Amino acid sequence: MAGNSFGKLFKLTTFGESHGKAIGGIIDGCPAGLKLNFEAIQNEMERRKPGQSKIVTQRKEADAVEFYSGIFEGETTGTPIGFVIHNTNQKSKDYSHIKDVYRPSHADYTYDKKYGVRDYRGGGRSSARETACRVVAGAIAKQLLKGLKINAFTSSVGDIFIDKPYQELDFNKIESNAIRCPDETKAEEMIAKVQAIKKEGDTIGGTITCVIQNVPAGLGEPVFDKLHAELGKAMLSINAVKGFEYGSGFCGAKMKGSDHNDLFNTDGSTKTNLSGGVQGGISNGMDIYFRVAFKPVATVLQKQSTINNSGKTVEMQGKGRHDPCVVPRAVPIVEAMAALVMADYLLLRRQESRDW
């Protein structure tokens, strides 16, 4: 099974399934001498872990990270960093009813057709449980990035959107509510929406906006490794993601060039930032901002018609513990993947220059 690694210089390879004994990963390429803040790493895990509020899955996992290599006396050694996160609260029996059944909009059918076998317990390798490994690596990448600031937040749930530009939001309020929305009024509406959807046994989607600040100009490798292209790949690799846009995004397609162009100030900065901090695939020193769309969680606690592995039409109903909306727990995952991309490009810059 290929496709389990991400990154070039700062590279993460993950392993494990949702209901296996553990999940984990190997981080290769992290420079030596980085003093790690383990409390900060675990805090990122707390932000992603299940059971943290009434509007997410109630699976209870400590998500405590155990490091096995690449670290000595709290500092990275430059060798591969190996880590494990034990699964302690699996309820595999909740999935026995889908052993031979393909859940609509899940990876059950496609995994079976590709590999001829699938781990039906919680989706196995296709489960979002795997993203915990990304958060570990992203937390380390954040510490490597030093001056860069990466903040993601819930910008919409269903048809409820934040109607303010990110510059008017207080990022310190992101963690003040269960939905991780810095607009307190909209946050209350979003939480109420998720709770109502949950009572119906249904799910709902939303969007996450991410802002990367203090980015130096000159990061990116045209033509095929453009900075925004790598960010897009990183985001689209996250479970349930259906779309990615940066800068003006799809709204830019409605504009005239004379209105869309970011005019320069004398210091090289721009008066506007519809480019989203990237021009020609290279960072220009302005804020990088993008939006990621998440679909409604595929598992609904309602009866649905589907097929089994014999091709017969059957009726099924979701059981067990599931997120009615994946967005709040996906916020730290988006930040983690953004950090991995930026770490890769900053390490490449280190190879090319010794000015940082």
Image (cartoon, rainbow, N blue to C red):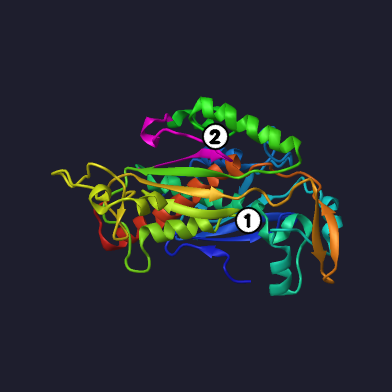
- Residue 87 lies, with reference to residue 168, above or below; the image says below
Residue depicted at 82% across the width and 71% down the height: 311
Q: Is residue 295 shown left or right of residue 244?
A: right
2 or 1: mark nearer the eye: 2
Residue depicted at 59% across the width and 71% down the height: 2
Residue at numbered disc 2: 180
The part of the chain drawn in magenta is: 148-170
Quadrant in the rendering for residue 105: bottom right
Q: Amino acid at mark 1?
A: Gly
Image x and y of residue 335, in percent: 48, 46
- Residue 184 lies, with reference to residue 250, above or below; the image says above
Residue depicted at 64% across the width and 29% down the height: 192
Residue furthest to the top in view is 185
Relative depth, front residue between 198 and 114 = 198
Q: Is residue 266 shown left or right of residue 84?
A: left
- Mark 2: give few (<14), some (14-19) or many (20+) Cα within 10 Å: many
Figure quadrant of the N terminus: bottom right
